[in-house]
Image: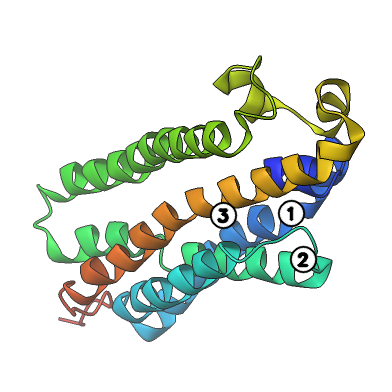
Amino acid sequence: MPTYFQVVRGASATVSGVLSLPIAIGVPVAVMCGSSATSLLGYYNPFMIITGILTPIAAGLLTSLSVEQSLTSLLCYQALLGVGAGVGFQGPQVAAQTILPVNDSPMGIALIIFAQNFGPALFVSIVQTVFTGQLLTRLGSLLPNLDTYSLSAMGMSDLEKYVPSADIPRVIEGYDKALTTAFFLPVGLACASMIGALGMEWRSVKRKDV
């Protein structure tokens, strides 16, 4: 999203950070709300299923971003993604504490935390590779002297240095198409999360009085 804001929308780094706040705020707020609601309801499954529904929708909406996208829709898409990703985030850890034997629970939680950190680190690199590959395909003829790193790291001020003013709209559109193409991988991963959510055992987290 920062690349979209800075290159496609021409925003500064500061403005880009401000415009990315819906995700940054939405995730932790949704995590807290999801955890509290799980304690009240007694089941983590509904919130994991909500994540499996909202996240693919939000990620799919991000693939529709264009140069003329309204600011309101940009903020709403990000907020929906943040809420969707956050509301069921604690579900696997709660499930491990609830389902696994006491001796196995710490190991289960550790594995889940590892997966929640390793997965994003891995797929961010894959999405970045898809993005730079798309940039080369779409902009290689316009910017033949720049390598993939330079292309992916350029901002609007850099474009004005290397690209004739008449070609800037084409380059901006190329960045937009490269970004939205790369967003299709997160859509697929978000859809796959529903499989895990539906396969979770339904067991109350509330301890019965003895």
First in residue order: circle 3 vs circle 2: 2
Instruction: Identify the residue at image location x=34%, y=77%.
Output: 49
CA distance for labels 1 and 2: 18 Å
On residue 102, the disc is none
Residue 1 is at least partly visible in this image: no
Label 1 element class: helix
* Foreground: disc 1 or disc 3: 3
On residue 21, the disc is 1
Question: Disc 2 marks which residue?
Answer: 69
First in residue order: circle 1 vs circle 3: 1
> In which quarter of the view is residue 71 placed?
bottom right
Residue 41, image x, y percentages: 38, 85
Question: Disc 3 marks which residue?
Answer: 180
Query: As shown in the figure, which amino acid type bears the numbered disc 2?
Result: Gln
First in residue order: circle 1 vs circle 2: 1
Q: Is residue 97 rendered to the left or right of residue 147?
A: left
> In which quarter of the view is residue 78 placed?
bottom right
Pointer 2: residues within 10 angstroms few (<14), some, or many (20+)? few
CA distance for labels 3 and 2: 12 Å
Residue 31 is at least partly visible in this image: yes
- Position of residue 204 relative to residue 174, above or below, is below
Query: As shown in the figure, which amino acid type bears the numbered disc 1?
Result: Leu
Q: Are marks 3 and 2 in contact (CB under 8 Å)?
A: no
